[in-house]
Image (cartoon, grey):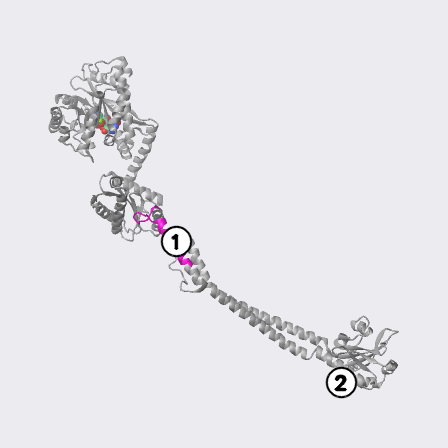
Amino acid sequence: MFRISAILVIMVLCSIGFIASLSYIEHARTTSSNSDALVDRAARTAATVLSVGTHSAIVAEDDAKGNPQALRIADDRGKDLLAPDSSVEELITQIARTNDGTAALFTWSSEKRAFDRIATTVTGTDGSPAISIETGHQAFEQLSDGKPYIGNVPAQGGERLAYLMPILTTSGKLVGALAVDIGWADDLSAAHSRLRIKFVAAALVILAIAVLIGNLLLRRELHPLRRLAKTADDLASGIQPDAIPYCDRSGEIGDLAHGLEKVTDLQDKLQKLAYTDPITTAGNRTRYFGDLSRVLKDARTLGHTASLLHLDFQGFAKINDTFGQQVGNRVLLQAYARLANVFGSGSKIARISGDDFCIIIPFDGDGSQAECKAAKAIEVLSAAFYLEDTEICIEPCIGIALLPADAQDVETAHRITGLALRAAEEAGEPCYRRFSAPLNERVQNEMLIETLLRVALRTQQMTLYYQPQVCPTDAHLVGVEALLRWPTEKRGFIPPSEFIPIAEKTGLILELGQFVLNEACKQAAKWVQAGFDFGQISVNVSPIQFKQPNFARTVKDVLATYGLSPRVLCLEMTENVFIDTSEKMVLDILSELQDIGVQLSLDDFGSGYSSLSYLHSLPFQELKIDRSFLANACNQPQKEQLFQAIAGLGRSLGLRVIAEGAETAEEFALCAAHRCDGVQGYFCSPAVPAMDIETRLEAFRRSVSLPATGSRRTSRKARRA
Ligand code: C2E
Ligand code: MG
Ligand code: MG
């Protein structure tokens, strides 16, 4: 800018100098032939000629500067002088010649109050009048007052510059006037206007040149400023320039460029903070959604396939709980390093929360890369992490979606990948699942059930039905199993096999289990009070519920609430309670329950990881043979032998044996033949509302022609309960 200022100052100075010299030259040329010199010369000439001429009695009277002011003549000579004769003509001619101009002599007529021209060098041959002093003209006023007049007077049809001197007698009486012509007044004004035109033209040219050069210079100087302003604008819009220009410059431009460079550095740092996960240095949630949006848009518009992977570690919370958050963070950091190694720099990895990683593969060709890399990621992440001499294992699960085939928008893409992940997690081991329509349907249904289940629990839509367990020899009631029923308006009864696993997955089973325990005990108390001998009431206990630290306490509290003897309550659990739990822990819980005095039953025996050691070492009082062993056992001797063996085993261990799923008279008879203590099955009765139990039993007994000995103390009161 200093350079521009300096250049402009120099230019303006040059312009002024140029105009001033032009003016000076023109002015000098004009003035050399104009007024002052001419006036002076004309006046002096006229005065001299007149005073030294024929009438030497005339004296020129000068002012302080020596310029003639008036001509004085003796009082008595005035008349002679102004008498028009040839000598006067001659005198005037001489004046005109000497002055190189024209001259005229006037007499003053005091009567007419007018100046009469008595002699002039302008003969008027061309018809133009000579100098005249007309009444009203300033020349007339000045002269009639005895003062000289220098200025324009009418002459020869124009204006002539003239020097007019009054001729006065010694006593001051005005007798005439002498006019000496100096030149055309127009000459001077023409010179003035010529000067003006030249001045304006020169000024315009200079101005135009100055504007042009100034503009060019400014453009040149402002170009870097414009580029830097554009860079600043880009920065503000989030566009990162490759490099800030003009950083090598000095001066204001360089300063500005360095300033912008600092801004980009700062922006870089802020960007990193805003989009980076501080624990792993992977992208964070914000970056993930931004990247996903861009990748999805590109894949849609350019027509290629991108893939999205959602990875989660099963039971990662345990690591934090067991080893502390610091160790958990280090595992995440190492896991990210392994992931980055598998997916490479072309992929975008972000940690969106806790142990959730999302990976975007922007170009996945035919979509096979995602599965390939997911398999590899599972392999490398399943390998143990070693931290502070501790071996830590995590179980990765991955959901995969192909874009845009599986989802058109960010929200759907993220959601369906989550669904695929959920499906992978359900497998219960490290694996990946690709999103598909059936998977979508299943998971959606599960999610719907989860929602409905929450509502059902809140609005108490759930109810308990009871299925009798009957002695196969005399059909008396040995027990009832409480089975949960969920009636819905749209879908009728949703079977427990559909909602119990979802309740277990979502943790709702705890609330549900508490409800069942409570309701069952409440009903049992009512029956006890009514004198209805139901044997025992069996309640199914989920492994999750079973492993709650305060489970035994809860059972005890519920029994106490309804004043129920622990002996009438039987808790059924399947072999699933042993999954992920040590036998010792199961034993401890069972022992606690045993201490309370409740009955313990091993449900669905033979359907799972049947281990005979459970039967031997754990304090069960009852064994329920899974219904798969009874189904068709009548037609298949080997199956019957198996059923017989299990029943015999249970009996030999001193357990009460209940056969599940007797649907026919033959199966019922088989249970009797193999000395089961109880039979539970549709042949006797399905699960029914509490109030219907007795009716169903009576109907059953009638159908098999057995005496109505089941509820030995059955009464009207019991039926009402
Ligand atoms: P489970 O404990 O083995 O219950 C017996 C299941 O077999 C019941 O099915 C019952 O209706 C059915 N069943 C009884 N007799 C027959 C028969 O003759 N033939 C056939 N095919 N089935 C028969 P449900 O009520 O659908 O319950 C299924 C499973 O859901 C139960 O198996 C139990 O594991 C679970 N469940 C039911 N209610 C609860 C509950 O309140 N809490 C928990 N944790 N689980 C429950
Ligand atoms: Mg059961
Ligand atoms: Mg069962």
Q: Which residue is mark 2?
A: 97
Q: Residue at x 53, y 70 (%)?
A: 10
Give the x, y percent position of residue 450.
31, 33
Q: Nearer the viewer, mark 2 or mark 1?
A: 1
* Magenta portion: prevailing SS class: helix
Q: Position of residue 558 (x, y in %)?
A: 27, 23
Which quadrant of the view contains residue 563? top left
Location of the C terminus by quadrant is: top left
Q: Is residue 104 above or below residue 565?
A: below
Magenta highlight range: 259-285
Give the CA separation, mark 2 to mark 1: 94 Å
Q: Residue furthest front?
A: 64
Q: Classify 447 as above or below 54.
A: above
The answer to whether residue 409 shows anywhere in this view is: no
Q: Which residue in the protein does label 1 denote?
A: 267
What amino acid does circle 1 point to?
A: Gln
Amino acid on which disc 2 is placed:
Arg
307 to the left or right of 50: left
Q: Residues within 10 Å of mark 2 (few under 14, many from 20)?
A: some
Residue 261 counted in the magenta span = yes
Which residue is at the front of the view, 303 or 117? Answer: 117
Q: Quadrant of residue 594?
A: top left
In this view, the residue in front, 463 or 115, is: 115
**Badge 2 or badge 1: first in the primary sequence:** 2
Q: Dot 1: what SS? A: helix
- Magenta span contains residue 292: no
Ligand 2 found in image quarter: top left
Mark 2 and mark 1 in contact? Answer it, CB < 8 Å: no
Please tell me how crowded label 1 is: few (under 14), some (14-19), or many (20+) other residues with Cα within 10 Å.
Answer: some
Vertical placement of 634 versus 714: above or below?
below
The numbered dot on residue 693 is: none
